[in-house]
């Protein structure tokens, strides 16, 4: 399906559109729109039985500078990619714990209450992807890492099973987020129009997408989502961020040091 037709159908309330087996895209306008931009929220969902989530960053490649999300996507042969999370002043280190298989980008566990885990260890009959609430009974980083090879800690937006927990604030920004739905599917979420995160949470929870948990990845002009499958290509770039860049004028993707990407699982890994 041509991208223009696809977007027209979704704008008219066409719901989810299949881009590939286990990969779907939807876009909808916020019920209470921002005063900047079109208030369109884009969500791409992936069946983790068919699509593999992976981390890549400069700490793993040994490079001194980052790349745009599109460049990371193309160099790593991802079908889609999004920011992995906020990073430190060195423009390299992830803020919060981050481990990808045997590679550890950041060993420090902070007070962020959301951990996305993937890559179940051999012999574990557990979901291939899961967003954990660190304040849930019995949940610790040690326990997560016993079951999963990869874990990414970020600030929490939505607590399982669908509760907005972001504090009230006036600050708003373009947003890139990672979510999980009530069927365990991976959600890449992007909105260029600036919202306070509590307001964005309300829109996501009311959208009927089954979102169960979500974490903040990046905001403002550094927020990005890139997707290219078949003849559908999406290049989504943020702009507005309170007290940093208070305008909708940014049109170029900024280099970032770390991303999360998805690629098709090898046939032998599919269940």
Image (cartoon, rainbow, N blue to C red):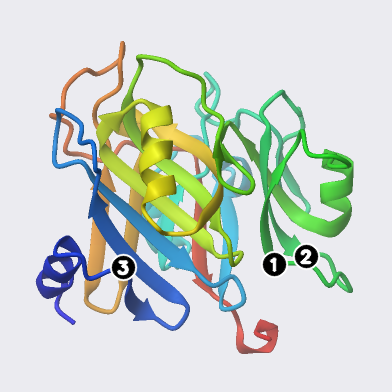
Q: Looking at the image, is mark 3 or mark 2 nearer the viewer?
A: 2
The residue indicated by pointer 1 is 128
Secondary element under disc 1, as helix, strand or loop, is loop
Disc 3/disc 2 C-alpha distance (Å): 27 Å
Q: Are marks 1 and 2 in contact (CB under 8 Å)?
A: yes
State the residue at coordinates (56%, 30%).
165
**Image quadrant assignment for residue 126:** bottom right
Residue 59 location, x and y as percent?
A: 61, 40
Tell me if 253 is positioned left or right of 206 in this view: left
Quarter of the N terminus within the rendering = bottom left
Which numbered disc flags the more N-terminal residue, 1 or 2?
2
Q: Is residue 247 above or below residue 10?
A: above
State the residue at coordinates (69%, 67%).
128
State the residue at coordinates (24%, 31%).
239
Q: Which mark is residue 228?
A: 3
The answer to whether one can see residue 223 in this image is: yes
The residue indicated by pointer 2 is 120
């Amino acid at each position: 399906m041509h991208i223009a037709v696809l977007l027209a159908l979704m704008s008219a309330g066409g719901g989810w559109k299949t881009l590939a087996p286990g990969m779907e895209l939807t876009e909808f306008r916020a019920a209470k729109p921002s005063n900047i931009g079109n208030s369109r929220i884009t969500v791409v969902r992936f069946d983790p039985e068919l699509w593999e989530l992976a981390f890549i960053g400069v700490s793993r490649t040994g490079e001194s500078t980052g790349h745009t999300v599109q460049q990371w996507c193309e160099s790593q042969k991802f079908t889609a990619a999004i920011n992995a999370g906020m990073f430190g002043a060195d423009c390299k280190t992830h803020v919060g714990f981050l481990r990808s298989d045997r590679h550890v980008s950041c060993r420090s566990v902070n007070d962020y209450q959301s951990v996305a885990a993937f890559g179940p260890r051999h012999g574990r009959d557990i979901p291939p992807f899961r967003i954990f609430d660190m304040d849930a009974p019995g949940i610790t980083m040690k326990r997560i890492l016993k079951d999963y090879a990869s874990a990414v800690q970020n600030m929490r937006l939505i607590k399982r099973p669908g509760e907005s927990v972001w504090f009230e604030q006036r600050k708003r920004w373009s947003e890139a987020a990672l979510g999980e739905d009530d069927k365990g599917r991976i959600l890449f979420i992007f909105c260029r129009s600036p919202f306070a995160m509590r307001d964005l949470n309300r829109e996501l929870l009311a959208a009927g997408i089954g979102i169960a948990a979500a974490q903040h990845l990046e905001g403002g002009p550094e927020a990005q989502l890139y997707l290219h499958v078949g003849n559908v290509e999406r290049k989504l770039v943020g702009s507005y961020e309170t007290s940093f860049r208070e305008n909708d004028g940014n049109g170029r993707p900024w280099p970032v040091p770390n991303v999360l990407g998805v690629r098709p699982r090898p046939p032998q890994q599919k269940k």
